[in-house]
Amino acid sequence: MENIIVGGAWPYANGSLHIGHIAALLPGDVLARYFRAKGNRVFYVSGSDCHGTPITIRAKQENSTPEAISEHYHREFCHVFKKLGFSYDLYTKTSDPRHKEFVSEFHKKLYTSDYIEERTVKQAFCPACKKVLTDRLVVGICPACGSATRGDQCDACGEVLDADTVIDAKCADCGTPLSFGETTQLFLQISKLKKELCAFLDAHPHWRKNAIAFTKRYIDEGLRDRAITRDLDWGIDVPKCGYEDKKIYIWAENVLGYLSATSVLCKERGVSFKEVYGNENRQSRHYYVHGKDNIPFHTIILPSLLLAHGAGLHLPDEIISSEYMTLEGRKISTSQNWAVWAKDLVEEYNPDSIRYFFIANGPEKRDSDFSWREFKKQNNSELVGAWGNLVNRTLAFAVKFLDCQVTPAIIDADIKERIRLLYKSVGTKIEKGTFREALEEIFDVVRFGNTYYDAKQPWKTRANNLEECRNTISNCTYLIANIAILLHPFLPFSSSKVSEWLGVEIKWKEQDIGVKVIPRDISILFSKMD
């Protein structure tokens, strides 16, 4: 049995999720559902990133505490993901004691490696606020591209920064020019791992172009060693004498959440963690799903931590890195309130309608745009007019005219072969991360089903050739049963309804209709949007 890790990026628990987050994370659930249907052992994990400066900033703004802020948004995230059908095996949080314990043990071993070095470095200080500033509280000009940036990472070009390299550095709170003192930190010597990281990149030529380009750029421009400790009040304690007043830098602990969450599941399932994350085990395949701004953390930072740790841990296999989702032609901006918030969307619309749009229009190769007009159009034309229509016209006909019977029939050889090939083709596309193409291929068969129904005219043959009429309905029902299985990773709510009506299991293989009589109370799958 192959072990499948599907790691969804951990959203910062300092504000609500928007449609950009959903577009980037939804492919993870498609992967998890698909591999479960294939019979693999799946570890679909993620959680809320509850540490870091953004949360302390939000807490200060709201006169609250980091614990209260992160817990509030963690609960909100859990609600949104549940409403959208995200089938996490474990959705946790970085403030969970089990994560903290795992990270602490990981770092203890990490500190004994040849890749950790103690250094005295510059530390930003605001003379007006009279306080030490974390990188995120430093603003200025990016030394790489010249755009306005924070001191930790440039949103414009993706460059991971050190605060003391930011040009014209100022305090984000008051705008005062900064001074820089000195402090001692532990550094991960990523530069020593250039050979291994180059080999890692070369071994994955099939990654998405943005993942290859970003990673290659970071390597070509010169890998920089990164501090893994910080002078912070909020975070995980550094497990080293002399560092009692410091915390583990967020980037050196949040990406370890994939491992900590998997270790929890391994204990619950009685599975060896080494079997799932050990590099010598070839029966594991690891997917990491995120937006393009998180690429370096999954292709440089996480592999560097795993390599430096020295326990032969499994490096990422597949990087599913999305481009951006824009809103009505403009970049989403939470500060300007130009966003569609996920918590609002899930309360108003069918979850499968939401899932369909963000997969059919997923930003896999380039930025995609969300517009209310297109959202409505695709729901009405594809989900109502094509898939819902095929299901309703076929099953409602059987209820009304055939006394709910779907008599076993000889399925057309061409239809059986098309379905058989469809499972293979769609599965291959899902495993390669081309979800839009996979979904479109399924809907090609949905449209074929409607064409077949029209050509066979069961509303006529029921009067003059009942056997042919029954055969037509049975062939259409066979199509519907298998399309429901194929669509289940994408549209789980409606697909589960159809599968239950027709008595078929969620297994990734061609299936016959599992019942002779369907329920009389067949309901419509999708409603038109006004």
Image (spheres, helix red, strand yellow):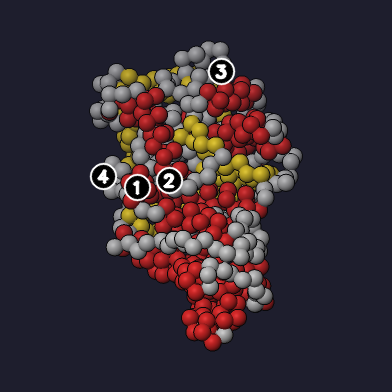
Residues under labels 2 and 1: Cα distance?
A: 8 Å
In this view, the residue farthest toward the bottom is: 464
Residues under labels 2 and 3: Cα distance?
A: 39 Å
Q: Are marks 2 and 1 in contact (CB under 8 Å)?
A: yes
- Mark 2 falls on what kind of element? helix
Position above or below: 486 against 269: below
The image shows residue 63 at horizontal and vertical percentages of 27, 24
Name the residue tied to disc 1: 347
Q: Amino acid at mark 2?
A: Lys
Residues under labels 4 and 1: Cα distance?
A: 23 Å
- Mark 1 falls on what kind of element? helix
Position above or below: 218 against 188: below
Residues under labels 3 and 4: Cα distance?
A: 40 Å
Q: Quadrant of residue 133?
A: top left
For marks 3 and 1, the one nearer the N-term is 3
The image shows residue 418 at horizontal and vertical percentages of 63, 72
Name the residue tied to disc 4: 336
Q: Amino acid at mark 3?
A: Pro
Q: Residue 83 got which mark?
A: 2
Q: Amino acid at mark 1?
A: Glu
